[in-house]
Image (spheres, rainbow, N blue to C red):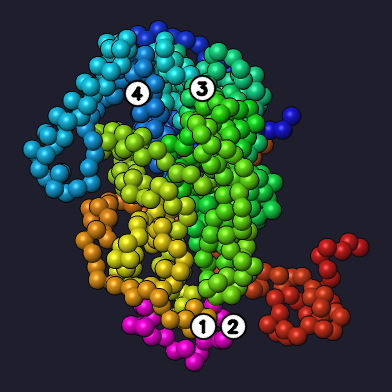
């Protein structure tokens, strides 16, 4: 049986002392009166072992064997905070149908978040808005005959009999599961699973240390087998969180079967090199889609994983409904509901699309895999007709690359995003990364839902070899041309628009006329020469419009933060036989940016003979990094 990869949150390696002290894996239940509420009570209940450290995040305090024997990436706190926020809102909707109200500490009366400064500054406007919300809620309650009123309540840290059953398939230290238990109300049980027995022992110990062993059940199983065993059962998991080190592809088939009807599936991908176009063949083998190395690669990665999940779900007559899909830092994170319905699954082909990308100018076109046409009261499904482009690009004459298929439907459910945003904004002290969550979700609500992929301003300028137009002026030109435009959370200078490529290049031609380039230096075969040789059919207007600047940008929300620390990206995979050693850490630093710089120490290979010098063909002379000493023996040869 293949070993399950560890979580990106925390990676447990060696725990010999822990294994001797805590041989039992399954967590025992304790009365609520015995649960420790403070760090002092925790220390009294469980004594720290020699060399053991405590990491605090949110309301959780997690024990680790030692700093060198465990993997913990604090940058992923945003991932965990966002997951807690999404899970809370999902549980709120789920439990409201059962007449249960969630009580979240520090949360005041709910209100709709508005990005308008006037509404924020006007108290009367907020009062009127809240009044309208109350009237709408009362009307909805009156329409739902027989629905129970929210008389029962659920609080975090307590078992809710009608609550959600949660599975964290790759739990490692159990940090995420412990945070769920302490911070998310409306949960019935949390299964924290890991293939490693040492990790399972640590999960059990951390659950008792935080006083949530009544909620967190430890499991030491293969994640895929655990989910396969739960498929088709009434007591299936309502929430499944898959956060592996690298690709989640091997767990997706089991996950779409094990999650309950309408349940929440959370997936993280950290293999961005594969999904961003560096290894398209590997991407196809894992996700059934060809990735492209283009400026929109991060959004395309989101659409690739959604396509892969939907394709696997369709095999079992199930389909997905994306709630939130974000690309952040070095990973992507998607939250989606999984439903069952044979009729809806017929739409699956029309939700996927191929991408035709020009290698010269970067223009792209989408080709749907299937089409549906009205046929009386029903829909007729058939194969799509295409391609949408010729063999060569009409703008620059270069060839096209074919990528995909990708998910071509909306990435988010804006109404659900708005609920999460409202909850986080009204209770900012709940999460340490609340400001970034607010900024990120605000950008998500501003994105054009029905427009896949995007351009970047610097990319367009680079193709034409001209000065980069200011972002607001370029957006204004699109708005003056009667097209919609928005930013993207996946890229800082993205232009997401429904304008065709011909309009995009007409705007760039108009900009080049005001900021001319030296055309005599352009090659006649270059994309810039062929694009600029045509006269624009559209006279672009670059006068800045008021609506060209989005509200999230006006309010200076935290949208794209600075690097939090040095070497902040994905850490090295933890080894089962031991921790992250000093040698591994030094090797990681040595190969940092190895493709962008020359070796600093040119003398480190001087103890090895130069093979080309022995053959008489070395042309480097004294600058050769190997030794030209004829008496020096090859270290690899033995006497």
Q: Position of residue 306 (x, y in %)?
A: 54, 41
The residues tagged by marks 2 and 4 sit, at their Cα atoms, a distance apart of: 59 Å
Q: Is there CB contact under 8 Å for labels 2 and 3?
A: no
513 inside magenta stretch: yes
Give the residue pinned by disc 4: 92
In depth, the one of 434 and 398 nearer the eye is: 398
Q: Position of residue 20 (x, y in %)?
A: 61, 21
Name the residue at 31% across, 46% down. Answer: 442
Q: Earlier in the sequence, mark 2 or mark 3?
A: 3
> What is the span of residues highlighted in magenta in the rendered image?
510-529
Kind of element beneath mark 1: helix
Name the residue at 65% across, 56% down. Answer: 279
Residues packed near mark 1 inside 10 Å, few (<14), some (14 to 19) or many (20 plus): some
Q: Position of residue 323 (x, y in %)?
A: 43, 36
The residues tagged by marks 1 and 3 sit, at their Cα atoms, a distance apart of: 56 Å
Q: Is there CB contact under 8 Å for labels 1 and 3?
A: no
Q: Position of residue 639 (x, y in %)?
A: 91, 63
The residues tagged by marks 2 and 3 sit, at their Cα atoms, a distance apart of: 56 Å
Q: Is there CB contact under 8 Å for labels 2 and 1?
A: yes
Give the residue pinned by disc 3: 261
As drawn, which residue projects farthest toward the right?
Answer: 639
Q: Quadrant of the N terminus?
A: top right
Kind of element beneath mark 4: helix
Q: Find residue 525 and name its label.
A: 2
Give the residue pinned by disc 1: 529
The residues tagged by marks 4 and 1 sit, at their Cα atoms, a distance apart of: 57 Å
76 inside magenta stretch: no
| Above or below for 265 versus 567 | above
Q: Is residue 17 visible?
A: no
Q: Quadrant of residue 149?
A: top left
**Which tag is nearer the camera, tag 3 or tag 4?**
3
Residues packed near mark 4 inside 10 Å, few (<14), some (14 to 19) or many (20 plus): some
């Amino acid at each position: 049986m293949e070993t399950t990869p560890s979580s990106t949150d925390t990676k447990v390696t060696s725990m010999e002392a822990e294994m001797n002290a805590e041989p039992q894996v399954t967590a025992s239940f304790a009365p609520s009166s015995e649960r420790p509420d403070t760090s002092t009570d925790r220390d009294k209940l469980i004594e720290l072992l020699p060399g053991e450290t405590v990491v605090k995040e949110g309301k959780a305090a997690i024990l680790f064997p030692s700093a060198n024997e465990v993997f913990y990436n604090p940058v992923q706190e945003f991932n965990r905070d966002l997951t807690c926020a999404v899970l809370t809102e999902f549980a709120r909707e789920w439990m409201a149908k059962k007449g249960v109200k969630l009580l979240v500490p520090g949360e005041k009366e709910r209100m709709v978040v508005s990005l308008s400064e006037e509404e924020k500054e006007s108290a009367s406007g907020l009062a009127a808005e809240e009044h309208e919300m109350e009237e709408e809620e009362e009307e909805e309650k009156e329409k739902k005959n027989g629905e129970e009123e929210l008389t029962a309540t659920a609080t975090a840290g307590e078992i809710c009999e009608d609550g959600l059953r949660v599975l964290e398939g790759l739990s490692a230290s159990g940090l995420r599961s412990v945070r769920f238990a302490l911070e998310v109300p409306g949960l019935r049980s949390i299964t924290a699973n890991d293939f490693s027995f040492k990790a399972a022992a640590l999960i059990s110990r951390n659950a008792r240390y935080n006083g949530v062993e009544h909620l967190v059940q430890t499991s030491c199983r293969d994640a895929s087998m655990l989910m396969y065993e739960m498929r088709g059962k009434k007591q299936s998991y309502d929430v499944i969180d898959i956060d592996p080190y690298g690709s989640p592809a091997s767990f997706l088939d089991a996950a779409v079967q094990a999650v309950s009807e309408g349940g929440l599936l959370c997936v993280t991908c950290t293999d961005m090199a594969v999904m961003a176009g560096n290894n398209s063949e590997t991407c196809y083998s894992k996700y059934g889609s060809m990735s492209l190395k283009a400026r929109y690669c991060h959004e395309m990665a989101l659409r690739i994983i959604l396509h892969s999940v939907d394709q696997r779900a369709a095999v079992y007559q199930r389909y997905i409904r994306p709630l939130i899909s974000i690309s952040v830092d070095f990973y992507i994170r998607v939250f989606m509901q999984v439903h069952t319905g044979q009729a809806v699954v017929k739409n699956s082909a029309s939700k996927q699309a191929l991408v035709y990308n020009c290698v010269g100018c970067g223009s792209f076109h989408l080709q749907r895999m299937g089409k549906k046409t009205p046929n009386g009261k029903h829909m007729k499904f058939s194969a799509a007709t295409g391609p949408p482009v010729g063999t060569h690009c009409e703008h620059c004459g270069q060839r096209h690359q074919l990528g995909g298929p990708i998910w071509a439907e909306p990435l988010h459910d804006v109404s659900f995003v708005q609920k999460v945003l409202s909850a986080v904004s009204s209770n900012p002290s709940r999460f340490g990364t609340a400001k970034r969550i607010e900024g990120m979700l605000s950008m998500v609500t501003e994105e054009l839902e029905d427009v896949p992929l995007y351009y970047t301003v610097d990319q367009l300028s680079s193709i034409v070899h001209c000065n980069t137009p200011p972002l607001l002026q370029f957006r204004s030109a699109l708005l003056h041309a009667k097209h919609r435009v928005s930013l993207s959370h996946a890229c800082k200078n993205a232009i997401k628009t429904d304008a065709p490529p011909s309009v995009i290049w007409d705007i760039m031609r108009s900009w080049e006329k005001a900021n001319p380039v030296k055309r005599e230096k352009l090659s006649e075969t270059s994309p810039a020469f062929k694009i600029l040789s045509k006269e624009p059919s559209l006279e672009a207007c670059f006068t800045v419009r008021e609506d060209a600047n989005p509200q999230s940008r006006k309010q200076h929300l935290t949208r794209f933060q600075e690097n939090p620390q040095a070497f902040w990206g994905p850490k090295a995979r933890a080894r089962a036989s031991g921790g992250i050693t000093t040698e591994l850490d030094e090797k990681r630093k040595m190969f940092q940016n190895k493709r962008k710089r020359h070796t600093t120490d040119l003398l480190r290979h001087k103890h090895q003979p130069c093979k080309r010098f022995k053959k008489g063909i070395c042309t480097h002379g004294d600058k050769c990094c190997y030794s030209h000493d004829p008496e020096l023996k090859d270290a690899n040869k033995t006497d």
